[in-house]
Amino acid sequence: MAMLWGLMAVVLVGTVGISVDFTRAQMIRAQMQNAADGAALAAARDYGASLSQRTTAARTYFDAEAGDYGGAAANFSLTPMPDGTYRVQASAPMSMSLASVISNNPWTIAVASDAIQSGVNLEVALVLDTTGSMSGQKIIDLRNAATNLVNTVVRAQQSPFYSKVALASFSVGVDAGGSASAIRGAVTPGHSISAADWRSSAARNITAAVRGSPSTTITITSAAHGFSNGDTVWISGVGGITQLNSKKWVVSGVTATTYQVTGVSGSTSFTSGGTATRCATSACEVVVTANSHGLANGAYAYISGVSGMTQINNAANTAWLVSNATANTYVLSGTSGPTFSNYTSGGTSYCTVYGCQYQRFTSQTGATRVFGVTTCVSERTGANAFTDASPSASPFGMNYSVGSDNPCASPNPIMPLTTNTNALNTRIASLTAGGSTAGHIGFAWGWYLVSPNFSYLWPAANQPAAYGAPSTMKIAVLMTDGVFNTSYCNGVISQLSGSGSGSTANHINCNSANGDSPTQALAVCNAMKQQGVTVYTVGFDLQGDANAISLLTNCASNPQHFYNAATGADLQAAFQDIARQITQLRISH
């Protein structure tokens, strides 16, 4: 009987021990699971690291949190999964307590955890300030921070959810590249010049020139000259009465072989030679032939590329006043045709109003300027100034600039949404600094690059989803280092623009219709937020500028979405934190 009671006691103690150890096991497993969850997140968040580096980060976290069941006691592994996430698996032995009376073999506690990206499609527009103040180390810091953000946000695995980044750099404007015509409208093209001449006849030889009464009237003999009373001729090469030479004269007293000119000074007599050529106009001006040129009297023409008569090629900030225009010809008012070389070939004639290849305008200082159009775009005006209406319905402003004073010379046009990190990083690596700050234009493109109303501009793979598309987030990350100082009127930097926006001699003498750049930037930020775009803003080296800080704080979706980065390290940290928030890592067991 005593033996029976002894056996029953062992069973009873073992049963209680199993219950106690099971409870212990559950507590240990919970501790290990929490450690594994954190380790998986640590591995996935160690952006740009190798598998070995990720494993070290994950193991360090696990060992610190697992207590007695980490370190050498635990088996630990980190495995990259086909979907681009990372799986942590860990196990550790748990020795028995009272249950050891039944079995002394330790229990193995095993846990696993996957860190996976949030289940949403990501459309992120990255807008970067590349103005002149970003030169030197600052542009290097920006390239590094932007590259890390791209590598974090764009996942290798693009299903079941995609993650795409679009890129726009801005300074004096945003370069639309090959999409410029579709965005701001096509430029009125130039027209090929086929002829340019001041003459309407060949030169006629002069065989005699006799002074009459009064002596200022000269009768000129020239067989078959073909002139008519009232014609203007240009005379050159006459011997003796040299006062006739290199001047235009009005013909009168015409016969078949003679004609007269009056007002000739001096008393010398004719000795030899000379020619007379009939002018095409009364002032012997150049007549240009360019079929369907579209110019009207009083307009100004800009000419380039002419061979031979190179004098009509326009120098900087000049254009020719047009007169006597017909469908296919016009006169360059004020030209002295006989002093120009003969036209041989080529050349293009351009109109010079807004929408043309060149625009002639009066500057803020009263100077005449002629600027060429670029592929950059300026702000949109009118009812759609602060909307994302399609450019086909409401074109954007053009950008006219010239020379080295604040040109739109960016080699980096906008990039639509893409999963191609190599292309994005190559573009980021090529960013250069220069120009003033039209921040409102840059910020607006943070919206347009994720707007479905702009989809038709891009190939299907680069098109933003519709607003309200299931499981899709549209995000704009807007970065700048300073005060917005550049706005536009008629495609030229306006006189409303502030210090640092280039010479006032190159600003047009009108104000921007939408207000200054900060006013426009805030309006476009508010509009995109109302459309559901999440906005992050990053100020870099703002040096405590209260206006810039206020603008960026108000532009962001909330104050926590504004980052004030004083140094390159701060900028890197800001972009990394934004990337982490965007990707929203979560745990799956």
Image (spheres, grey):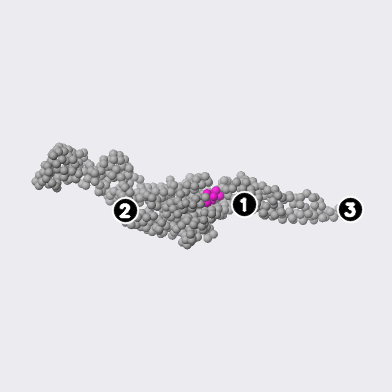
Q: Secondary structure at mark 3?
A: helix
Residue type beneath disc 3: Met
314 inside magenta stretch: no
Give the residue number, with chain letter if any, for mark 1: 42
Residue numbers of the magenta segment = 145-152
Q: Residues within 10 Å of mark 1 (few under 14, many from 20)?
A: many
Q: Are marks 3 and 2 in contact (CB under 8 Å)?
A: no
Amino acid type for the residue under numbered disc 2: Thr
Task: Compute the Cα span from label 2 to label 1.
Answer: 62 Å
Q: Secondary structure at mark 1?
A: helix
Left or right of 20: which side holds 496? left
Name the amino acid, label 1. Answer: Ala
Position of 345 compared to 427: left or right? left
Majority secondary structure of magenta residues: helix
- Mark 1 and mark 3: Cα distance apart in space: 57 Å
Nearest the viewer among 531 and 378 is 378
Give the crowd class for mark 2: few <14, some 14-19, many >=20 residues within 10 Å: some
Question: What is the x, y in percent for residue 110?
Answer: 70, 50
- Relative image position of residue 133 (x, y in whole percent): 45, 54
In this rendering, the label closer to the viewer, 1 or 3: 1
Q: Which residue is mark 2?
A: 368
Q: Mark 2 or mark 3, which is nearer the start of the sequence?
A: 3
Residue at x 69% of width, y 54% of height: 66
Give the label on residue 3, or none. Answer: 3
| Residue 132 position in % (x across, y down) | 44, 53
Q: CA distance from mark 3 to mark 2?
A: 118 Å
Q: Nearer the viewer, mark 3 or mark 2?
A: 2
Identify the image quadrant of the N terminus.
bottom right
Kindly tell me whether residue 470 is visible in this rendering. Answer: no
